[in-house]
Amino acid sequence: MTSHVTIIGAGLAGSEAAWQIAERGGRVVLYEMRPELKTPVHKTDHCAELVCSNSLGSNQDTSAPFLLKQELRNLNSLVIRSGDRHAVPAGAALAVDRNLFSAEITQSLERHPNITLKRNEVKDIPFDGPVIIATGPLTSPALSDRISSLLGQGYLYFYDALSPIVDTNSIDMTKAFFASRYGKGDADYLNCPMNKEQYDQLVDGLCKAEKVPLKEFEKPVYFEGCMPVEELALRGPKTLAFGPLKPVGLNHPETGERFHAVVQLRRENKEGTAYNLVGFQTKLTYPEQRRIFRMIPGLENAEFFRYGAIHRNTFINSPELLSADLSLRKNPNVWFAGQITGVEGYVESCAMGLVAGLCALSRVRNAPFTRPPKETAIGALLHYVTEGPPKGNYQPMNVNFGLFSGEEFKIRDKKVRNAKIIERALAMQREWLKTLS
């Protein structure tokens, strides 16, 4: 066995795994195929590049995503540290300037004396020592085939989609207004209000629009938390008004007017020069996106920095394949981490990378590793990935309080219950941290 850990993929999971190992004195060889081999969605050669959204989820102190980020902060997470440093206003969410965020992570990894970053595609899995596979949803075809052969089964998969980004200067500010839902935050979201006629026209346009065709061997298996907006529209004329376009809590701050529907835009960078259409992930063709999204009041002349897109996300049936420490049951020297394990979300991927890194380092040092308690957010996610849901219907999962259990769930007041869960989790994490070397 080699004295270093090999990590394939420098996304959020791979970057975090490398950082955790290196900060504890371990040596890492980290492979990233970009820019040698590009993907359909990445635009830079930065490590930990964000492609679907610039949001790292809720920062409300009674939410499960907040708890997960707090636990990662307590573990000196490189990803969360960079996110905190490069945050942009986004109400109760932690959104980041994606370029500054990934640039800092890349620089931190390149400069670390215990990390060797290699820029080339890995086509086979090295079995001469501990290796972490953190290639994410866009694993290269060659390595994907090798992994599939190793696992002895085909991948599971679903589809994920990107929301469009528009030029702020092209938004009609006489029609849009700044406000956060129920006044939470500092009016960070830009809102485009719609009356019923405008809303109905948008829904009709989405239902009839031309979509990018799937390849012959593909079938649409969408993750419910990131459904294409046109798929939601097809579910019924009121679906969007009760979903991403719900107007509740978004009365006009000056007139008090209530609207039939509201499209929200979130700042994409610190300068505020670009805004992301929240909930408008899509697989429409580019011309159709331009035509239909310009139906939204305030976006009639919108200029698009990036159109929405769709790509296939790949994940393995982790509960059947992985041990409790994320290592492969049939080959304990191989770990999987990040979205490929079936967690959904940037921070969740980071968390599984962190766990895989700690486990691999323990193996190198021939030292025991204690799993984080499943009463913690990291532990709850790890338990889901390695144990799966009760009925065996394994699907991608974000962190949420449904993954937790305990006496706290007998409390009927949700805010009080969640606060108790968070208090318990952080207390148990403090004890668990004492077991780490």
Image (cartoon, rainbow, N blue to C red):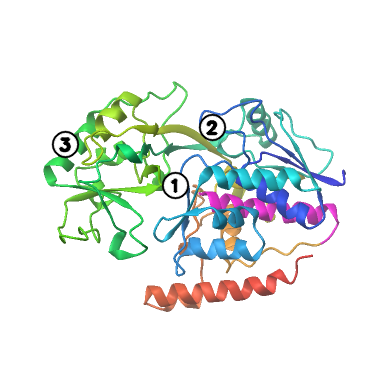
Q: Quadrant of the N terminus?
A: top right
* Three-letter residue code for mark 1: Glu
Distance from the alpha carbon under mark 3 to that under mark 2: 34 Å
Residue indicated by mark 3: 201
* Three-letter residue code for mark 3: Gln
Q: Position of residue 7 (x, y in %)?
A: 73, 42
Instruction: Label 3: state its secondary structure.
Output: helix
Label 1 vs label 3, nearer the camera: 1
Out of 189 and 52, give the one closest to the viewer: 189
Q: Is 344 situated left or right of 135 in this image?
A: left
Residue 159 lies in quadrant = top left
Out of 65 and 104, give the one closest to the viewer: 104
Q: Is residue 413 magenta?
A: no
Residue 93 lies in quadrant = bottom left
Q: Please tell me which of labels 1 and 2 falls first in the chain.
A: 2
Q: Is residue 46 above or below residue 348?
A: above
Residue 271: give its label: 1
Range of magenta residues: 345-367
Quick one: label 1, few (<14), some, or many (20+) residues within 10 Å?
A: few
Q: Residue at x 69, y 52 (%)?
A: 356
Residue 118: give its label: none
Q: Is residue 15 visible?
A: yes
Dominant secondary structure (helix, strand or loop) of the stretch shown in magenta: helix
